Image: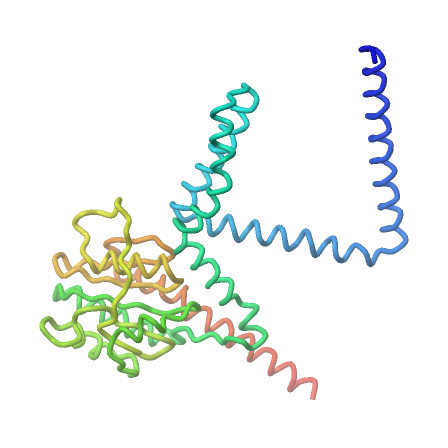
Amino acid sequence: MGKAEKKATGSLLKINFNTYYQEHILNYMGELYKYPIKLIPMILDIAIVIFLVYKFIKFSKDSRVRQLLKGILLYILLTALSSVLQLTIINYILTSFLSYGVIALIVIFQPELRRALEQLGSNKLTRFIGIEKDKYVQTKEDIYKIVIAVNELAKSQTGALIVLEKDIKLTEIIDSGVMINSEISPQLLVNIFVPNTPLHDGAVVIRANRITAAACILPLASDQDIAKELGTRHRAALGISKESDSVAIVVSEETGKISLARNGVLLVDIKEETLKQILIKDFAEKYNTKQNKVKKITQKIKIKK
């Protein structure tokens, strides 16, 4: 077969493919016009994909995940470049690594994957269908009590670590400490962290509106870029905020400064008012909004009756 015949055959195949593709699209559009109900699965499919992409982008705000994405993009570019430039040995090494790379990523990013799956399991959908209920710190009064205690601890430069549980349950953390199950009280929180007392080491965990346990052991963050002047309590606070969606408050015994860890980020030397605003936004506002919705629904039902 000559070059002219090959070129003609290629052009014919291209025309046939384009024609088939156009006919396929027209037939599909015709079916959608006749049966609009078929649009529902398509819209649902697109909506789910958009939601998953949004969740992934939100989750990828973590610095380690960002670095992972950069590494994957660089790996893809190098693989494509080695193929285009016909660098056989490099291309073989890169493509061979791909089969083992997935397993390596699962091992390296096990904490992040675990956190993502836990967040998926504690999604609002599960709470909506009744599998799990919101048990946040419920009132602004509870928040004020915690802030008062933290402020007193900061003034006396008493080291403290308080963890507020959210959706992801900290049962294993709670089991590592001493059960208290008491109402939130500034005096009790301050007394727990008095130096040389049995419960002053470790963290206090608050579940819903109760002090659940004290002297709890938290996982330490392994971040190398954390400031050297920050101690074990700060590493523990950052560690629990990376492995769960909880919020951790730290009082430094060296400086008396207040720090807060949430979503894998440590905010150092924050003021009392800032702490109060963050906690109210994360906890009390969600509860109050939910309560207002329930009241409105109840009122509508009464009006209909």
User: Can you say which quadrant of the picture contains the C terminus?
Assistant: bottom right
Q: Nearer the viewer, residue 296 or 237?
A: 237
From the viewer's perspective, tell me whether residue 75 is left or right of residue 297: left
Q: Is residue 91 above or below residue 63?
A: above
Q: Is residue 120 above or below residue 79?
A: below
Q: Nearer the viewer, residue 278 or 42?
A: 42
Q: Nearer the viewer, residue 289 or 283?
A: 283
Q: How many marks?
A: 0
Q: Residue at x 43, y 59 (%)?
A: 114
Q: Residue at x 58, y 78 (%)?
A: 296
- For the view shown, which residue lies furthest in the left direction? 196
Q: Position of residue 272 (x, y in %)?
A: 26, 62
Q: Residue at x 12, y 57 (%)?
A: 254
* Quarter holding residue 172: bottom left
Q: Position of residue 139 (x, y in %)?
A: 39, 76
* Quarter holding residue 236: bottom left
User: Can you say which quadrant of the picture contains the N terminus?
Assistant: top right
Q: Position of residue 183 (x, y in %)?
A: 30, 83
Q: Position of residue 89 (x, y in %)?
A: 48, 24
Q: Residue at x 48, y 60 (%)?
A: 117
